[in-house]
Image (spheres, grey):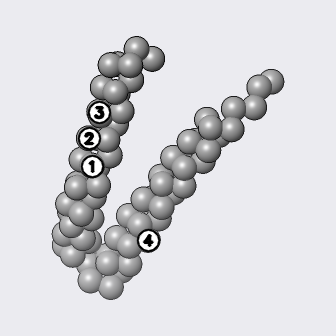
Amino acid sequence: MSRDLRQYARQTNVRLAAGALLLLFLVGDGLIYYFYGAGAAVMGFLCLLGGLLPVALTILAVALLDWLAKLRDGE
């Protein structure tokens, strides 16, 4: 059994990010629903998605540049 610490760190970071997003959406939107109702919860969900759009586009752009750099270097 090999120990690839880079792969382990990458996997841990992905799990932490997924947990943070899940916590943000479930707890945040759940509290909005509890205090303000269903209409506000839908609007809160849409605002959370809109706020994450620039983050997702930035991550996608960096991943694309990484892929192009590896393609150019022949890795």
| Residue at 75%, 31% in the rendered image | 3
Question: Residue at point 38% right, 19% down?
Answer: 73
Nearer to the camera, 23 or 9 = 9
Q: Is residue 42 above or below residue 31?
A: above
Mark 2 lies on a secondary structure that is helix
Quadrant of residue 37 within the rendered picture: bottom left
Residues under labels 2 and 4: Cα distance? 29 Å
Please state the horizontal and vertical placement of residue 66, each as a whole percent of the image: 36, 33
- Which label belongs to residue 61? 2
Q: Earlier in the sequence, mark 4 or mark 3?
A: 4
Q: Are marks 1 and 2 in contact (CB under 8 Å)?
A: yes
Percent position of residue 33, x then y: 32, 76
Label 3 vs 1, first from the N-terminus: 1
Residue highlighted by disc 4: 27
Q: Is residue 45 visible?
A: no
Q: What element does badge 1 sit on? A: helix
* Mark 2 and mark 3 residues within 8 Å of each other at the beta carbon: yes
Above or below, 54 relative to 73: below
